[in-house]
Image (tube, helix red, strand yellow):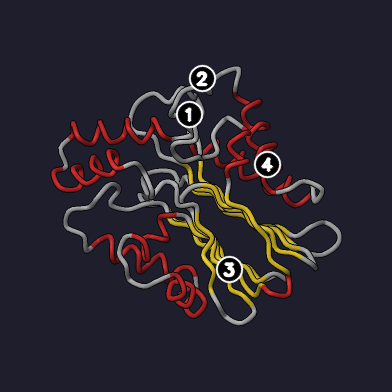
Amino acid sequence: MRVEMISEPGDPQRPNEDYASAALPASGTGGVLVVLDGVTPPAGDDGCVHGVPWFVARLGGSLIELSGARRDMTLAECLAAAIGRVADIHRETCDLSHPRTPQATVVVARWDDHHVEHLVLSDSALLIETDDGTVLPVLDRRLAELPPFVQDLRDRVRASGDPADRTAYVRAVESLRNAPDGSGFYTAAADPSVAAHAVTGSHPRSAVRTLLALTDGATRWTETFHLGDWPALFGLVRKEGPRALVARVRTAEAAVQRPRGKPHDDATVLLAEPG
């Protein structure tokens, strides 16, 4: 297995809330990769004494261990078990029912001699290059497909920057995150049942050449700045490496005179050629 990766904080004065790792099994063939993007809460209490970097480190570590060692479990089952394991670590000290409890988006891919499995939850992305060079994006689009009233609030914030509109927008999005009625979108927080809502699938091992996992700080190249489609993004990373993609995102961010949301975001890129 060949792996190239980079993870760069959006602000060097703040901890990086992304996580990336890849591993080979102790015996046999195959491998696994995990990429997480911690959800930065608005300023204020989130009910947890530990914080997002603590959470993503533990969730990522548990997830790569379970995905690599428990081949009898599906990736969704591995994610559910990892969420439960981390929740058990801090449920005595933290309010895990708080809507801003630490949480993360998730990308996992696992392969052996026969299959390549994948799981994507929320707005990180996985690109799969097939044996004929086709690039297949695996995306969870629920966060991008919010109800019209939330999209209207978002557009008002982008147009005016009004603090009251921003507060209303944040609250509306929070009401849809992990909503029990299924009306919104899902992130990995403290409830293992969200794993059942992840986008999952598999391909024959012989049909997969390369995997590329990205947090939304890196997918800005395509989804925010529209500098190229998914195959073009993949081609850039293939030709120049993960660092080149992040550098181009930073250049595009710096050119924006009136940033929408975060001026810069944590950006993680992991390229793996399964061995």
Q: Which quadrant is home to the N terminus?
A: bottom right
Task: Estimate the x, y position of residue 251 in percent, counting from the top left.
Answer: 29, 66
Residue marked by disc 4: 62
Circle nearer the viewer, 3 or 2? 3
Circle nearer the viewer, 3 or 1? 3
Gap in Å between the C-alphas at discs 1 and 2? Answer: 7 Å
Residue marked by disc 1: 101
Task: Estimate the x, y position of residue 175 in percent, counting from the top left.
Answer: 39, 30
The structure residue drawn at horizontal position 41% and vertical position 61%, both measured from the top left corner, is 219
Secondary-structure class at tag 1 = loop
Residue marked by disc 3: 128
Gap in Å between the C-alphas at discs 3 and 4? Answer: 24 Å
Task: Answer with the quarter of the image where residue 220 lies.
Answer: bottom left
Asked if labels 1 and 3 touch by Cβ distance under 8 angstroms, the answer is no
Q: What amino acid is at disc 4? A: Ser
Gap in Å between the C-alphas at discs 4 and 1? Answer: 18 Å
**Mark nearer the N terminus (3 vs 4):** 4
**Mark nearer the N terminus (3 vs 2):** 2
Crowding at mark 4 (Cα within 10 Å: few <14, some 14-19, many 20+):
many
Asked if labels 2 and 1 touch by Cβ distance under 8 angstroms, the answer is yes
Gap in Å between the C-alphas at discs 3 and 1? Answer: 32 Å
